Amino acid sequence: MEKEEEADRREEATKRIRASSPRRSVGGSDSRQKREEAQRGLEEGAKERAERERADSERKEKERAARKGTAKGRHIHPPEENPGAEEQSNLTEPLSRQMRKSGKRSLRTELLMRKRP
């Protein structure tokens, strides 16, 4: 009898805690919505960047076409309107930037790795 009452009290306490605290959905619609918003933001940013770079690209293409002979220089590629693979967005704090991953190890890491047998 005491065990049943204790279990009931724990269950009621758990329900109160869950009701009072904001729920976090793991992989739910809230996180999916954030990912979709971030993707739209990246796509819009890439389109805006392409529009800004388009005028410069057209100017360079005209300059290249005006040159004579085979020494025109490299081909001018139009700007991409899609976000590149390296462009990322921070879902928890959209205004903060993602840290770039570097292939280099720090000096401290190198020293620690050398000490290991």
Image (tube, rainbow, N blue to C red):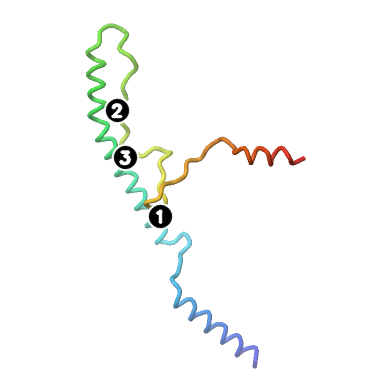
Of residue 92 and residue 95, the one placed in the foreground of this image is 95
Which residue is at a point 69% across and 40% down the rendered structure image?
113
Residue mark closest to the camera, 1 vs 2: 1
Residue 75, disc = none
Q: Which residue is mark 1?
A: 93
Q: Which residue is mark 2?
A: 78
Residues at marks 1 and 3, CA–CA distance in whole angstroms:
20 Å
Left or right: 5 as drawn, with respect to 15: right
Q: Secondary structure at mark 3?
A: helix
Residue mark closest to the camera, 1 vs 3: 1
Q: In the image, what residue type sits under mark 3?
A: Ala
Label whose residue precedes the other's in the sequence (3 or 2): 3
Quarter of the image that includes the N terminus: bottom right
Q: Secondary structure at mark 1?
A: loop
Q: Position of residue 89 (x, y in %)?
A: 40, 48
Figure quadrant of residue 48: top left
Of residue 93 and residue 16, the one placed in the foreground of this image is 93
Left or right: 56 as drawn, with respect to 28: left
Q: Residue furthest top?
A: 69
Q: Residue furthest bottom?
A: 1
Quarter of the image that includes the C terminus: top right
Q: Which residue is mark 3?
A: 46
Of residue 43 and residue 48, the one placed in the foreground of this image is 48
Please, is residue 63 above or below residue 57 in the view?
above
Q: In the image, what residue type sits under mark 2?
A: Pro
Figure quadrant of residue 77: top left
> Label 3: how many residues lie within 10 Å, few (<14), some (14-19) or many (20+)?
some
Q: In the image, what residue type sits under mark 1?
A: Glu
Which residue is at a point 30% across and 36% down the rendered structure image?
81
Of residue 71 and residue 40, the one placed in the foreground of this image is 71
